[in-house]
Amino acid sequence: MGLTGLLLVGFLVEHLAGNLKLFEDADGAAFHKYKEWLESFGPLLTVAEVGLFLLFGAHIVIALKLSVENREARRSRYVIRSSRGQSNAASLSMLITGSLILIYLVKHVFFDFRFDGGYQDEPALTVKRTLASPLNGFFYLAAMGILGLHLAHGFRSAFQSLGLSHPKLDPLLDRGGIALAVILAVGFAAFPIYYLFLWNGGAP
């Protein structure tokens, strides 16, 4: 669970870095070059996409398995939940926020862009127009808030599941997880905020 989670965090960091190309110029040339660079890997890109899909799948399956195991454990009178006192909104809603992120991911990748012929011809403009749509833009903002909540606990939990826990290390991981969650959530949220409220629609 921890390993798949950290690998997905790495994907989010790379994805954000790629999306920042949208802000480099007004005509979308930088983002278009980034898209062409990815496509230049040919079959390797397909392998990477399949690998990413399997990574998401593994993370989800493991999460569901752990959820079932936790429910079964709570039925036993002999099980003591030592972490109950440390629970918070982020930790208690991991399965819910993870499910909502999955639903949004399917919409965002497949319905917004994957099957949109305009994305292949004008990728930057298609992304901008999609995020400039109030329905899509605010949906995206809500999803990023959920992502931030998920990461706030998930990052710290990933290290704990890998056995990397120590009284001196734990506070740093807690703060690091919150910082990472804020940076990624705000970073991704910057796109719909800009295109909803500041973008002129590509007019000169």
Image (cartoon, rainbow, N blue to C red):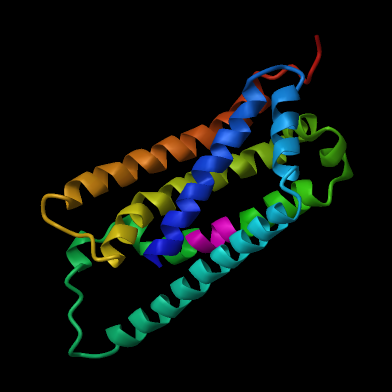
**Which residue is found at the position 63% from the left and 39% from the top?**
138
Q: Is residue 132 visible?
A: no
Q: Main secondary structure of the magenta part?
A: helix
* Front-lying residue, 71 or 9: 9
Q: Nearer the viewer, residue 115 or 190?
A: 115
Residue found at the very far top of the displayed protein: 204
Q: How many marks?
A: 0
Residue occupying the point 38% across, 41% down: 180
Residue at 70% of width from left, 42% of height from top?
38
Left or right: where 66 falls relative to 136: left
Question: For residue 23, which quarter of the picture?
Answer: top right
Magenta span includes 99? yes
Q: Position of residue 140 (x, y in %)?
A: 61, 42
Residue at the (48%, 34%) spot, across then down? 186
Up/down of 171 relative to 69, above or below: above
Q: Nearer the viewer, residue 185 or 142?
A: 185
Q: Is residue 169 left or right of residue 122?
A: left
Identify whether 88 is placed above or below 22: below
Say whether residue 201 is left or right of residue 20.
right
Q: In the figure, 56 relative to 66: above or below?
A: above
Q: Position of residue 25 (x, y in %)?
A: 68, 17
Provide the residue span drawn in magenta.
98-102
**Percent position of residue 85, x then y:** 18, 63
Residue 57 image-quadrant placement: bottom right
